[in-house]
């Protein structure tokens, strides 16, 4: 395969870059070792930052966030719920920080308005009655999966190619350039090579590993952040604790649920991570100080992601256990300036979900300068299309369509999120058009199957049975996929096993192990 640009990584930056370059008329191939948003892009709270969270620790990143916040609200409104946000302080919080907050926001050109604590509690009745200060900002929420799927779908519409489950295994060099990239298809086991004029490393937390394969060096550290999903939505706005960023100080509404987070825990590797019980305890304790209901509500799932942070060689921060001191800005690394590194390798890393488009634009500018392409960026003025590929991640859409259509033979496969057979058929058709590989995890990523209170207990086996009936699964494939699907859900359930969650887990075990004997199947 031959292309002008090879992008490694299909997170929000990689897919956004693919769209930017495709709109400029370049040929692009994206390779991803798993599926879209498999890393940090799929492991965040879906917050479209106003920038106010970083006004003290990183004013430059705060200003970038605010500009992109406003731009994305204009260009991708279908991915965003414009909730607004509140920063609130409770008794005992740092009064100096509270007093300085509005001025620090204004220095970063972030609009802010003080509201009386009583008014804030009228806006959000779950807020603590110990509130001492509140400010309105223009935070919002964004669906990160819809954002990436729409970016990739539009990129493909303009000629880009996506290869899922394809891992880079090495580079062949010639005259200090990457001449050929070798990938292996993790499903079929087949190897393939891609010749590209420029290779962009957008592998997120794995950027250092990819760069190392090419003989380049990136100093990175990995900061794990864990989050909890409540069974119901507890707030209409994003609620932030009014203090320097720390654990458990953001509650983000997300469709029918709320997401509470996050932590910052240094880990050695991004490959084996999971939410831990001590993180759950900390998040709930801290969150309950601003919203007491968080101490007694039911949580249906925990999940985590790894922030790829650059600057591990910074003596001021490398020994500091709190990785929140590391900049949330992004780094565009031109490896041509590094001795011994390939001259046609570029790495883009760091940054925020909110600034993904800007990161893609700056990277595409550098790529184009290398290739002598003069076409300018269009993603800053061209609306992101609302594509069929991403429509079923939207909360409430599947039940709305199902109830309106009233088709008696369109059975529900997921009763929690009301996902029907026809929705699954549409997603399967899209996957087949992409690479012909419908599977449970891919369908779950592109819909809300498994995301409701049962966490896959019932819908997983219904979905597998349906795929068998339609001939999409054969032999032991379904059992293998069922195990993978439930393993992923279990990782998020395990640290939450008390009360209803414990009973739910025992029911799942009784059904899938006691009845189906799924634990007896060989692991893939």
Image (spheres, helix red, strand yellow):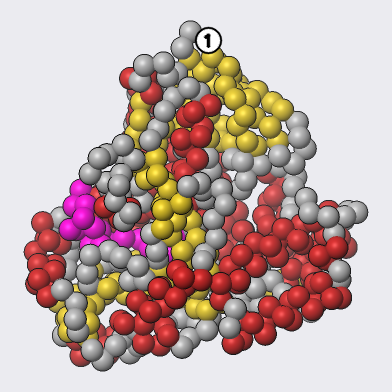
522 sits to left or right of 186? right
**Residue topped by disc 1:** 174
Q: Badge 1: how crowded within 10 Å, few (<14), some, or many (20+)?
A: few
Identity of the residue furthest to the top in this view: 175
Relative to 193, does residue 460 appear above or below in the rendering?
Answer: below
Towards the viewer: 342 or 161:
342
Quarter location, residue 285:
bottom left
Q: Residue at x 40, y 73 (%)?
A: 282
Q: Residue at x 68, y 62 (%)?
A: 487
524 sits to left or right of 76? right
Towards the viewer: 442 or 43:
43
Is residue 52 magenta-colored?
yes
Q: Which residues are magenta?
A: 44-60
Quarter location, residue 488:
bottom right
Is residue 280 magenta-colored?
no
Quarter location, residue 361:
top left
Q: Residue at x 43, y 48 (%)?
A: 222
Q: Residue at x 46, y 81 (%)?
A: 233
Identity of the residue furthest to the front in this view: 319
List x then y, in percent, for residue 100. Answer: 9, 67
Locate the N terminus by quadrant: top right
Relative to 410, does residue 201 appear above or below in the rendering?
Answer: above
List x then y, in percent, for residue 264. Answer: 38, 59
Q: Secondary structure at mark 1?
A: strand
């Amino acid at each position: 395969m031959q292309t002008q640009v090879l992008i490694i990584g299909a997170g929000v930056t990689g897919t956004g870059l693919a769209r930017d370059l495709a709109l400029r008329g370049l040929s692009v191939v994206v390779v991803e070792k798993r599926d879209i948003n498999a890393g940090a892009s799929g492991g965040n709270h879906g917050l479209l930052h106003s920038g106010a969270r970083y006004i003290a620790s990183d004013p430059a990143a705060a200003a970038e966030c605010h500009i992109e916040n406003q731009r994305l609200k204009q260009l991708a409104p279908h991915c965003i719920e414009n909730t607004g946000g509140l920063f609130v302080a409770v008794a005992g919080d740092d009064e100096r920080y509270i007093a300085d907050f509005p001025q620090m926001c204004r220095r970063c050109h972030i609009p802010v308005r003080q509201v009386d604590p009583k008014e804030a509690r009228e806006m959000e009745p779950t807020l603590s009655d110990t509130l001492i200060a509140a400010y309105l900002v223009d935070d919002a929420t964004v669906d990160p999966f819809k954002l990436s799927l729409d970016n990739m779908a539009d990129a493909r519409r303009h000629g880009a190619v996506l290869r899922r489950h394809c891992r880079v295994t090495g580079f062949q060099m010639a005259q200090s350039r990457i001449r050929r990239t070798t990938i292996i298809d993790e499903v079929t086991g087949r190897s393939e090579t891609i010749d590209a004029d420029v290779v962009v490393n957008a592998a997120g937390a794995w950027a250092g590993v990819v760069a190392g394969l090419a003989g380049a060096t990136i100093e990175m550290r990995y900061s794990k952040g864990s989050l909890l999903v409540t069974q119901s939505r507890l707030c209409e706005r994003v609620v932030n604790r009014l203090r320097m960023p720390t654990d458990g100080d953001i509650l983000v509404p997300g469709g029918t649920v709320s997401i509470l987070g996050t932590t910052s825990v240094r880990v050695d590797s991004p490959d084996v991570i999971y939410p831990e019980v001590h993180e759950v305890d900390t998040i709930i304790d801290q969150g309950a100080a601003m919203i007491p209901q968080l101490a007694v509500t039911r949580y249906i799932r925990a999940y985590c992601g790894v922030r790829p942070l650059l600057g591990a060689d910074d003596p001021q921060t490398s020994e500091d256990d709190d990785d929140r001191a590391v900049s949330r800005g992004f780094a565009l690394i031109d490896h041509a300036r590094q001795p011994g590194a390939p001259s046609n390798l570029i790495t883009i890393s760091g940054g925020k979900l909110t600034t993904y488009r800007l990161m893609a634009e700056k990277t595409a500018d550098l790529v184009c300068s290398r290739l002598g392409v003069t076409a300018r960026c269009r993603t800053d003025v061209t609306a992101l299309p609302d594509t069929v590929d991403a429509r079923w991640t939207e909360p409430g859409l599947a039940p709305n369509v199902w109830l309106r259509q009233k088709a008696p033979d369109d059975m529900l496969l997921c009763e929690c999120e009301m996902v029907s057979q026809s929705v699954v058929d549409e997603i399967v058709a899209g996957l087949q058009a992409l690479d012909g590989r419908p599977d449970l995890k891919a369908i779950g990523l592109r819909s809300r199957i498994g995301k409701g209170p049962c966490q896959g207990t019932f819908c997983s086996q219904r979905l597998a049975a349906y795929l068998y009936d339609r001939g999409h699964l054969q032999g032991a494939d379904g059992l293998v996929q069922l195990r993978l699907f439930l393993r992923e859900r279990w990782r998020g359930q395990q640290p939450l096993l008390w009360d209803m969650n414990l009973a739910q887990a025992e029911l799942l075990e009784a059904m899938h192990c006691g009845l189906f004997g799924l634990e007896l199947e060989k692991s893939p």
